[in-house]
Image: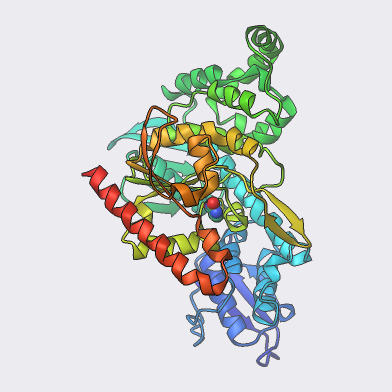
């Protein structure tokens, strides 16, 4: 749906305009209007952003520049869909101000975290990420029968307009089920092949009890760890408003009442929860958690505080289970931390390019890091990557081991010394060990390959880059051949 631009009668080229967008998160309408406004030189202060009370009434005004893409910095392009679902009525005007300034002499504006516009928009994006996380984690389906058979229905009340942003996650997760998610603003319907959106529903459209509920409840009771109970943090993480939709939370009051006794019993049974800076104990505590799948492991990682505070979020591994090749890096960088995905910053882009040149399909490979949180020091407004210590690497090692167990790749590629340390427990110079390598710390389980980290190539002086890149490419070609051999 394209936004409609209403020029005021007195408007010249830069005169006042009103943009009408549909209610909720009108990403297409906003993008389209922003493109046309910027192309026609409309300054942010001349634009009023307004939301139509009735959706779907209008189309594009046919302005000639509607489809011409703007040359915006990647960080701005990425931020737009993260902010549009926010409830704040000023979101569109702030986004357009950001776009305008980025196009007019402030190309690196997004790096100025203290700028009031950047700051507010970043906070909005963070609120959306949190709302999405809650919807992904706390939505519960209930089974119903209709003429076509089994169907699942869920009710959820997000804080922001996130239904369309959240729904693809459920398609991936529950692709084989037919389901409907109802919210006060609209519904998402998956029929097993297509995702569609429709009118709002109400809580009473969802049945009260079904066979799923006992299962959720047992799961919650058995995974509940009384030693970690912090009712305040628990309420902040899982606000009470969601409890009504979650069968397992019926158990929370009783579990909280019993927590003190159960904690005392646990203390007698085993050492206390490890201190943050004692990697060996932290690893032991992790091992206690015993996840049964990569999803369960990832849920644990996602919820765990960074060892060194500061990171926006945990950056999880990405790629298919059973991938032939798994690449292990050091830790997420600045871009990875903001986007929540591994290898999407400059080093990741270089890696992608080299993988493509070597004939390795990045999408079919598994990419992860030894350490799951970004560690940095602030230099002015910039977050400068800081190498993890051996203790920190050791703290995260159990996660990596379990992760690779679940992914079960044929060949594990260590990118750089930190990955080697995480995979072998030893500091081995890359120059000595570069090439095929047996990671025998864990029952000779993984055939490995050691090569340099792509960020090493980025740091080299220009005259040395070409040769180093060629050597890296050679390694990747050997990795591709070895992977193909092992997968055969
Ligand atoms: N460097 C890494 O080691 N991992 C990333 O995800 C990005 C940069």
In this rendering, the answer to whether 238 lies above or below 460 is: above
Q: How many numbered marks are there?
A: 0
**Can residue 341 be seen here?**
no
In this rendering, the answer to whether 326 lies above or below 43 is: above
Q: Quadrant of residue 153?
A: top left
Residue 217: image location, x then y, percent: 51, 20
* Left or right of 99, for residue 300: left
Residue 249: image location, x then y, percent: 59, 24
Residue 196: image location, x then y, percent: 40, 53
What residue is rendered at 32% in x and 55% in y?
478
**Can residue 217 be seen here?**
yes
Which image quarter holds the C terminus? top left
* Left or right of 294, for residue 257: right
What residue is rendered at 72% in x and 25% in y?
231
What residue is rendered at 69% in x and 22% in y?
229
Most foreground residue, 476 or 252: 476
Most foreground residue, 469 or 284: 469
What residue is rendered at 55% in x and 65% in y?
458
């Amino acid at each position: 749906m394209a936004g409609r631009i209403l020029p005021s009668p007195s408007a010249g080229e830069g005169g006042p305009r009103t943009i009408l967008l549909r209610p909720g998160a009108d990403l297409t309408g906003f993008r389209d209007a922003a493109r046309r406004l910027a192309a026609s030189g409309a300054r942010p202060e001349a634009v009023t952003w307004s939301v139509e009370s009735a959706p779907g009434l209008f189309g594009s005004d046919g302005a000639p520049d509607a489809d011409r893409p703007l040359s915006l910095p990647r960080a701005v392009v990425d931020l737009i869909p993260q902010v549009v679902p926010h409830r704040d009525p000023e979101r569109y005007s702030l986004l357009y101000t950001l776009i305008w300034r980025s196009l007019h002499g402030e190309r690196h504006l997004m790096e100025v975290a203290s700028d009031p516009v950047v700051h507010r928009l970043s906070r909005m994006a963070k609120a959306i990420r949190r709302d999405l996380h809650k919807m992904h984690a706390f939505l519960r389906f209930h089974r119903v029968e209709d003429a076509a058979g089994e169907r699942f229905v869920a009710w959820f009340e997000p804080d922001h307009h996130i239904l369309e942003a959240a729904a693809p996650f459920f398609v991936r997760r529950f692709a084989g089920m037919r389901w409907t998610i109802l919210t006060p603003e609209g519904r998402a319907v998956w029929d097993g092949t297509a995702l569609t959106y429709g009118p709002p529903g109400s809580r009473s459209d969802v049945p009260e009890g079904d066979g799923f509920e006992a299962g959720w409840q047992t799961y919650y009771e058995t995974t509940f760890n009384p030693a970690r109970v912090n009712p305040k943090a628990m309420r902040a993480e899982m606000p009470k408003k969601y409890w009504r939709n979650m069968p397992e939370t019926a158990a929370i009051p009783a579990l909280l009442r019993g927590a003190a006794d159960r904690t005392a019993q646990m203390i007698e049974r085993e050492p206390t929860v490890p201190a943050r800076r004692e990697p060996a104990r932290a690893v032991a505590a992790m091992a206690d958690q015993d996840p049964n799948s990569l999803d369960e492991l990832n849920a644990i990682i996602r919820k765990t505080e960074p060892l060194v505070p500061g990171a926006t979020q945990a950056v999880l591994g990405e790629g298919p289970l059973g991938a032939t090749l798994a690449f292990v890096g050091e830790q997420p960088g600045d871009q990875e931390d903001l986007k929540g995905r591994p290898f999407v910053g400059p080093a990741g882009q270089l890696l992608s390019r080299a993988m493509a040149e070597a004939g390795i399909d990045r999408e079919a490979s598994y990419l992860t890091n030894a350490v799951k949180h970004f560690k940095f020091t602030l230099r002015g407004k910039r977050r400068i990557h800081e190498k993890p210590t051996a203790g920190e690497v050791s703290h995260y090692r159990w996660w990596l081991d379990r992760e690779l167990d679940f992914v079960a790749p044929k060949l594990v590629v260590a990118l750089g010394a930190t990955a080697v340390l995480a995979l072998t427990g030893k500091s081995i110079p890359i120059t000595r060990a570069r090439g095929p390598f047996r990671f025998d710390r864990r029952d000779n389980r993984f055939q490995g390959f050691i090569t340099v980290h792509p960020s090493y190539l980025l740091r080299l002086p220009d005259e040395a880059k070409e040769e180093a890149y060629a050597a890296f490419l050679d390694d990747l070609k050997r990795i591709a051949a070895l992977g193909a051999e092992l997968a055969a």
